[in-house]
Amino acid sequence: MGIFDRIGARKELFLGPGELPMKEYRSEKRGCRYWRNLGLFAVLVGLGGLLLLIYAGHPYYLSRGWSHPERLAVCCATPDNYGMEYEAVSFETGDELTLQGWYVPSRNRAAVILSHPMASNRVAMLGMAEVLARHGYGVLLFDLRAHGESEGDVLPFGGNEREDVRGAAAYLQTRADVDPDRIGAIGQALGAQVSILGAAGTPAIRAVVADAPCCTKAEDFPPPSNLGDWLYLPYDLVFFRMLQWHAGVSDPESVQAAVARISPRPILLIGGGSEQSMLQHHYQAAGQPKELWIIPEAGHIAGLDARPEEYAERIVGFFDRALL
């Protein structure tokens, strides 16, 4: 008996009664159909993962960043650097937060509240403050909640951030150099929408300039007009639901609703060419009197840099008409 016959005989010793020997395994060559189906399955899994990342992962990450912005230190420049005499001030909000800021006294009995962009602080508004102070306006630059040196850990969208502007207006009404009926507000990006939200519920604010206001809800975006807009629609819906969850705001007020409540007080909307559709959307919701100024060559909140003289003339003229 050869060695291979012995091995076969030993295999049979392990079989139970009635069991048949196992057939030897033989690899079979995979056909084109198998590999085509496997490739299609891999593509579908990859596409599903990509869609999950785009429409769930990224909205989660971005909404977390919006509601918990990174604090930027208040440093390296003060109103002194722009030739303005000022004093450090603080004031309370309606929900009991203390906000820090700078105040440049008024020489014309009017004052303007300046609100900065997201992940920034009052330093970002020094150039704007210098323009207004040069024309006699008092200017209040302050750090929004969860920014700079102000209190607060969460930035709500369409929630209590309106209290920041209302608190600033209440502070200005206590100043001896300010006529309580001559208070305006100006903001950029986040500061623009906070100015709108605050002014909507604060009659003390008599005029608003909003440079590139954005959104607190999906309805703040214009209706879809092309394929790209339709592809963004589910992203926006998921993003704003997650933003509400991160910010703890169950029923946010939209910028669209707030801007409609400012009338009959005047509002000036400003922005660059890429922001035209959003601005026109807000402009249509606003009541009279209202103005819209698009600066085609300007980037985001870069109108003052793009056209410094015209920008200064526009905002000063607007506040002169509204407050003086």
Image (tube, rainbow, N blue to C red):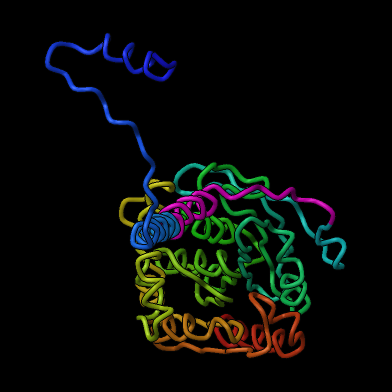
Whether residue 224 is in magenta: the answer is no
Looking at this view, is 206 or 32 the one in front?
A: 32
Q: Is residue 296 visible?
A: yes
Looking at this view, is 34 or 295 the one in front?
A: 34
Q: Residue 143 location in percent, x, y?
A: 64, 53
Q: Residue at position x 58%, y 43% from top?
A: 98
Q: Residue 284 location in percent, x, y?
A: 39, 86
Give the image quarter of residue 8.
top left
Q: Magenta segment, principal secondary structure?
A: helix
Give the image quarter of residue 231.
bottom left
Give the image quarter of residue 321.
bottom right
Q: Which residues are magenta?
A: 52-76
Whether residue 54 is in magenta: the answer is yes
**Where the N terminus falls, by quadrant?**
top left
Q: Residue at position x 47%, y 80% from top?
A: 278
Left or right for 47, reference 313: left
Q: Residue 246 location in percent, x, y?
A: 43, 46
Above or below, 208 against 114 in this view is below
Above or below, 241 against 232 in this view is above
Left or right for 273, reference 197: right
Q: Residue 197 location in percent, x, y?
A: 44, 65
Q: Residue at position x 82%, y 66% from top?
A: 84
Left or right for 304, reference 199: right
Q: Residue at position x 59%, y 72% from top?
A: 186
Pick out the residue farthest to the front: 1
